[in-house]
């Protein structure tokens, strides 16, 4: 417990006294520390009392150039938030053998090397928020760190040294009682060498560092006399964890991480499950690429239906499209079916890989995410989700033109259709391929999760999130706006055409136009069915993306269903919706023919009976 505004007698015990009892001639602390340094000369702007030296009204914008005023008996020095880089060597030379607490946070320090042992009894050292780039000893010049020889050092805080890339744990060889080491918010990219680190360490904070891999042999395999109590790896984007990386690591109380793999029994070895704290992966579990069985079944069903249905639509229109009066409409349907087919192939890839890795997926997680198959799967996903809304927009525009010009067999000429198709496919291919380029490889767009999809709907923003937001959200919203506007205009035109068809005079005078108009209206109803099915899905992705951009991200479970069911599901529904009227017409014709063939027989049966 800490009593704010009170004097702590000793760094070890928890005795606090009121400030009025400091230097009052009476020893109130167990060791009389409240009466130490009561009559010492102190520099202007500092407070020196009770063995403490604290900056008072000192102008912290000025660099500190002299610390000779600090009494050798001082036990705590607080010089945070001022530039002390010029007096570090002088501070060490004061021989503060009683100093137990040194606070040099945000002091513009970029070097910790000195020529001799400075503070042999130091217990707590705060070096956070400085400019340190490397911590190691210099054997050629016999330079040591300022905490060298501090056998009582209990806590070392190096957090928020954002330039610190190299930390040699050999510098801690003389700190035999170190318990707490804080390296959070630094640029360290490799796990500290635990083999040379003191075995008394209990709290290790490596959160928000650049550590991405845990290799075999990271932790010592020899029995550790004092296991870590807390290991914090939150905020570290750990992607690759080798099978035996955590072997030898013992954690008593808490292991914090954002990587679900660190809590998988296949990798944790000697770490109990109840001490591991990590969020679940939105897609995968330790044993399966797709963790939910229902979701896995739906992915299989959607993939099979999408591939078979869209292949059937393509074959049907290729076989009959050239004799169809609505050639432009047929060409656009084929383009839409091809884009939906790509989504079906993506779903089958994910479903088949789920079977391949079933049981021990976590051991292959990084291999899968970095594989060419994962990149190919997301490329298909991106391409399909980008070009499908564009072809729906062209279909709706085609219907609008056809209703207004019923005698024109091809509202879009073959040249326009070809030009629009090539432009759409080229734009989609370009946008889908951007994350694969050498200068965008660090985005890791296609390896952000096991589904190989990065829709910008979650709170975390990885490199390249601006591009994915512009592609998936902004462009998607603009196309949805175009689809909604075109469908509304088509609805108005269709309503006017139906009113005209109800006039007997119009039908008599324009028989051919009426027949063509009814055909166009029938096709428009099919396109409207697809529009009203697909548009809500695209709009949902757009709206949720805009909300995520504003800080209101969707949940992880919702993200999985959006990525693997709702958006890809349209590719399976579209061929069913579009083929259903044709199937109904075929059944109606079959029934009519059968009834017609049975009609004469039913009429002859009475006469034959009379005979």
Image (cartoon, helix red, strand yellow):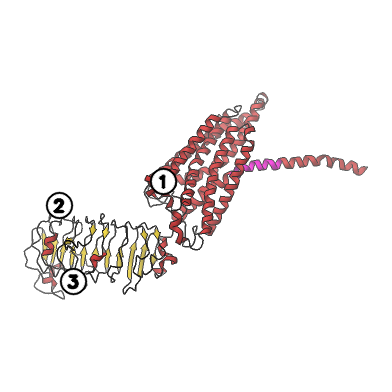
**Residue 250 relative to residue 37: left or right:** right
Q: Which residue is mark 3?
A: 10
Which mark is in front, 3 or 1?
Answer: 1
Compare residues 387 and 397 and report the one nearer the observer: 387
For label 2, the SS is loop
Q: Residue at the spot x=74%, y=40% of the render?
A: 592
Look at the numbered discs 2 and 3 and tell me whether their residues touch, using CB distance below 8 Å: no
Q: Which residue is mark 2?
A: 61
Query: Which residues are the magenta region?
Result: 575-588
**Residue 78 relative to residue 423: left or right:** left
- Name the disc covering residue 435, or none: 1
Image position, residue 568 (x, y; %): 52, 48
For label 3, the SS is loop
Q: Main secondary structure of the magenta part?
A: helix
Reply above or below: 129 against 319: below
Tell me the crowding category of disc 2: few under 14, some 14 to 19, or many 20 or more residues within 10 angstroms, Cα based. few
Separation of residues labelled 1 and 2 (CA atoms): 46 Å
Reply above or below: 171 against 575: below
Separation of residues labelled 2 and 3 (CA atoms): 31 Å
Q: Sequence order check: which comes first, mark 1 or mark 2?
A: 2
446 magenta-colored: no
């Amino acid at each position: 417990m800490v009593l704010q505004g009170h004097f702590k007698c000793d760094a070890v015990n928890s005795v606090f006294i009121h400030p009025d009892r400091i230097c009052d001639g009476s020893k109130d602390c167990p060791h009389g520390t409240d009466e130490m340094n009561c009559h010492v000369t102190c520099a202007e702007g500092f407070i020196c009392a009770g063995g403490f030296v604290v900056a008072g009204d000192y102008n912290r914008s000025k660099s500190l150039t002299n610390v000779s005023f600090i009494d050798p008996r001082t036990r705590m020095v607080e010089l945070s938030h001022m530039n002390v880089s010029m007096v570090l060597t002088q501070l060490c030379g004061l021989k503060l053998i009683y100093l137990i607490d040194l606070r040099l946070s945000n002091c513009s320090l970029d070097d910790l090397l000195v020529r001799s042992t400075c503070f042999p009894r130091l217990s707590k050292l705060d070096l956070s928020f400085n400019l340190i780039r490397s911590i190691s000893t210099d054997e050629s010049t016999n330079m040591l760190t300022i905490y060298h020889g501090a056998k009582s050092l209990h806590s070392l805080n190096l957090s928020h040294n954002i330039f610190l890339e190299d930390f040699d744990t050999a510098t801690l060889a003389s700190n035999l009682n170190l318990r707490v080491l804080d390296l959070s918010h630094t640029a360290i990219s490799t796990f500290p060498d635990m083999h040379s680190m003191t075995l008394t360490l209990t709290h290790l904070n490596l959160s928000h560092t650049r550590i991405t891999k845990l290799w075999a042999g990271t932790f010592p395999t020899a029995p550790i006399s004092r296991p870590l109590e807390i290991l914090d790896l939150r905020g570290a984007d750990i992607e690759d964890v080798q099978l035996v990386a955590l072997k030898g690591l013992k954690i008593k109380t808490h292991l914090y991480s954002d990587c679900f793999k660190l809590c998988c029994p296949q990798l944790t070895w000697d770490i109990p499950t109840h001490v591991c704290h990590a969020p679940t992966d939105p897609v995968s579990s330790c044993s399966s690429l797709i963790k939910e069985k229902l979701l896995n079944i739906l992915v299989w069903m959607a993939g099979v239906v999408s591939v078979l249905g869209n292949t059937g639509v393509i074959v049907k229109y290729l076989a009959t499209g050239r004799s169809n009066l609505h050639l432009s409409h047929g060409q656009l349907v084929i383009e839409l079916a091809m884009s939906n087919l790509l989504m079906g192939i993506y779903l089958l890839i994910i479903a088949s890989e789920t079977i391949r890795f079933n049981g021990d997926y976590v051991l292959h997680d990084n291999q899968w995410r970095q594989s060419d198959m994962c990149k190919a799967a997301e490329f298909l996903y991106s391409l399909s989700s980008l070009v499908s809304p564009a072809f729906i927009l062209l279909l709706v525009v085609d219907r609008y033109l056809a209703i207004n010009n019923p005698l024109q067999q091809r509202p879009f000429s073959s040249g326009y259709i070809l030009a629009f198709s090539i432009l759409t496919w080229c734009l989609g291919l370009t946008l889908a391929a951007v994350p694969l380029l050498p200068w965008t490889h660090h985005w890791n767009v296609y390896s952000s999760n096991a589904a190989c999809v990065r829709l910008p709907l979650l709170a975390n923003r990885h490199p390249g999130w601006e591009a994915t937001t512009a592609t998936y959200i902004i462009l998607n919203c603009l196309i949805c706006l175009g689809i909604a506007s075109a469908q509304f205009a088509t609805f108005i035109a269709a309503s006017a055409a139906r009113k005209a068809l109800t006039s007997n005079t119009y039908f008599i005078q324009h028989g051919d136009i009426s027949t063509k108009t009814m055909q166009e209206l029938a096709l428009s109803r099919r396109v409207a069915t697809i529009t009203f099915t697909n548009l809500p899905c695209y709009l949902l992705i757009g709206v949720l993306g805009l909300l995520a951009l504003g800080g209101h991200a969707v949940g992880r479970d919702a993200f999985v269903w959006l990525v693997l069911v709702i958006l890809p599901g349209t590719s399976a529904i579209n061929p069913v919706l579009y083929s259903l009227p044709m199937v109904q017409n075929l059944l109606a014709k079959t029934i009519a023919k059968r009834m017609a063939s049975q009609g004469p027989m039913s009429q002859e049966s009475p006469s034959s009976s009379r005979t």
